Image (spheres, rainbow, N blue to C red):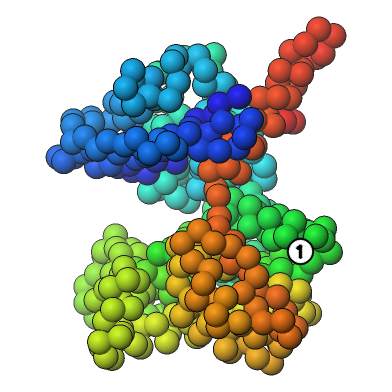
């Protein structure tokens, strides 16, 4: 079975074709700047063939057609016919309080995802466009499944997900903590348990997804009990361009003093804050270079970032009354030893101790334990694979549908898959 995994943005469409027999990627890429000048498609196969082409891409339907044309191209394609694709799996950022698991797409599911657009206007709208574009290209008979960033965090108790604001806003608008990066936290937590040769249910684990966008999750008894991101991905600790948690009065104070509109404030907090707001750089490679060269603001930005990561890890250790392992993942978590080392230095009281040689060695795809032999709490670097989580869920749903369609089997509702 081959599954096409789609991760759509407002002006982009990332894709990956995965052979579920081996669970290996056979082609991947991105259509970027959809609807704008300079739009392009990038394509790469597992055997090293690739191309990049600047072309007009009016909408997500055009993007889908470019992707499917590339996949079956006589020279660079990896399949002979689109019929070799068994299903399409989509990443959806916001599932709200409606979806706590992955589901098969139907008209009602699309309507429900659209109803959640106010909670994630930059994500859910384009993701629905991608679903409709896939229908246009593949036809209504192609099974499509949706996997939600928020669903892995749906196990949080009310004491963790509610905000201390009038309860009526939760009742009226579902204002609460939802959490994001759920597919990443889910993948690395299960993979780490496998590496530890223990059931996930027996481990108190803290997973740290550290990238340009970052979040940390506390996992106990196999379930998320708390996570740093909130109603939106802006909450938590400082990120590449996002502010993370701050005194709400900062927002109202600046809006009044500077005459800033809500839309402008949203841009400041999401695009002009975080590491970028402190030192004027957002790419960590540039920040690291500036730090080495003695740039005091770059040094400060890293110090703040590391300090805040350590604070959340410590608070989650307290929330679970202990921690059995810590996992670092995503772009910086997998490839920035200095951030891992800096954060773990704050955790000596927990008995955390990194092996400096292993910590420096485990980058660029190498994963495993980086803690010292005498560290009370083991620390791991694990390469996240969100696309594989989406493909696995999609395969499971399609397999159940095929089982239900065999003779003497009744139809099953997508919500039951």
Residue 174 location in percent, x, y? 58, 54
State which quarter of the image contains the N terminus.
top right
Q: How many callouts does the rendering have?
A: 1
**Relative to 159, is 312 above or below?**
below
Residue lying at 45% horizontally and 72% vertically, measured from the top left:
336
> On the image, which quarter does residue 367 sit in?
bottom right
Residue indicated by mark 1 = 196
Residue 316 location in percent, x, y? 67, 76
Determine crowd level at label 1: few under 14, some 14-19, many 20+ residues with C-alpha closer than 10 A: some
**Relative to 220, is 121 above or below?**
above
The single residue placed furthest to the top in the displayed view is 407
The single residue placed furthest to the left in the displayed view is 37
Question: Is any part of residue 388 visible from this angle?
Answer: yes
Residue lying at 80% horizontally and 14% vertically, measured from the top left:
410
Q: Nearer the viewer, residue 337 or 33?
A: 337
**Relative to 269, is 142 above or below?**
above
Residue 155 location in percent, x, y? 72, 56
The secondary structure type at the circle numbered 1 is helix
Residue lying at 44% horizontally and 14% vertically, measured from the top left:
81
Residue 173 location in percent, x, y? 54, 53
State which quarter of the image contains the C terminus.
top right
Q: Nearer the viewer, residue 158 or 333?
A: 333
Residue lying at 38% horizontally and 39% vertically, measured from the top left:
48
**Relative to 336, is 140 above or below?**
above
């Amino acid at each position: 079975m081959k599954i096409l995994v789609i991760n759509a943005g407002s002006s982009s469409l990332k894709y990956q074709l995965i052979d579920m027999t081996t669970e290996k990627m056979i082609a991947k890429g991105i259509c970027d700047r959809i609807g704008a000048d300079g739009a392009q498609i990038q394509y790469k196969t597992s055997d090293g063939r690739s191309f990049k082409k600047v072309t007009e891409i009016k909408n997500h339907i055009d993007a889908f057609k470019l992707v499917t044309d590339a996949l079956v191209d006589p020279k660079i394609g990896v399949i002979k016919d689109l019929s070799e694709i068994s299903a399409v799996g989509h990443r959806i950022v916001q599932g709200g309080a409606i979806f706590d698991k992955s589901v098969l797409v139907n008209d009602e599911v699309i309507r429900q995802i659209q109803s959640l657009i106010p909670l994630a206007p930059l994500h859910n709208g384009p993701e629905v466009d991608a679903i409709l574009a896939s229908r246009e290209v593949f036809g209504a008979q192609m099974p499509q499944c949706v996997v939600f960033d928020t669903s892995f965090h749906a196990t949080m108790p009310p004491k963790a997900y509610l905000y201390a604001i009038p309860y009526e806003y939760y009742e009226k608008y579902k204002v609460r903590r939802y959490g994001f990066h759920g597919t990443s936290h889910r993948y690395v937590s299960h993979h780490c348990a496998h590496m530890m040769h223990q059931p996930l249910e027996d481990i108190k684990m803290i997973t740290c997804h550290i990238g340009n966008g970052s979040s940390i999750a506390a996992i106990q008894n196999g379930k998320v009990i708390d996570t740093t991101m909130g109603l939106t991905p802006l909450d938590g600790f400082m990120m590449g361009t996002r502010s993370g948690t701050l005194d709400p009065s900062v927002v109202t104070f600046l809006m009044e003093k500077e005459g800033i509109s809500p839309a402008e404030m949203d841009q400041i907090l999401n695009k002009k804050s975080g590491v970028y707001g402190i030192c004027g750089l957002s790419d960590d490679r540039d920040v690291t270079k500036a730090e080495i060269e003695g740039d005091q603001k770059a040094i400060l930005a890293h110090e703040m970032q590391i300090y805040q990561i350590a604070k959340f890890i410590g608070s989650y250790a307290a929330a679970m009354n202990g921690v059995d392992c810590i996992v670092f993942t995503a772009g910086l978590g997998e490839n920035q030893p200095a951030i891992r080392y800096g954060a773990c230095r704050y955790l000596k009281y927990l008995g955390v101790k990194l092996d400096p040689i292993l910590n420096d060695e485990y980058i660029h795809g190498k994963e495993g334990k980086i803690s010292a032999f005498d560290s009370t709490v083991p620390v791991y670097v694990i390469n996240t694979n969100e696309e594989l989580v989406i493909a696995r869920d999609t395969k499971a749903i399609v397999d159940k549908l095929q089982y239900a369609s065999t003779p003497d089997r009744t139809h099953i509702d997508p919500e039951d898959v």
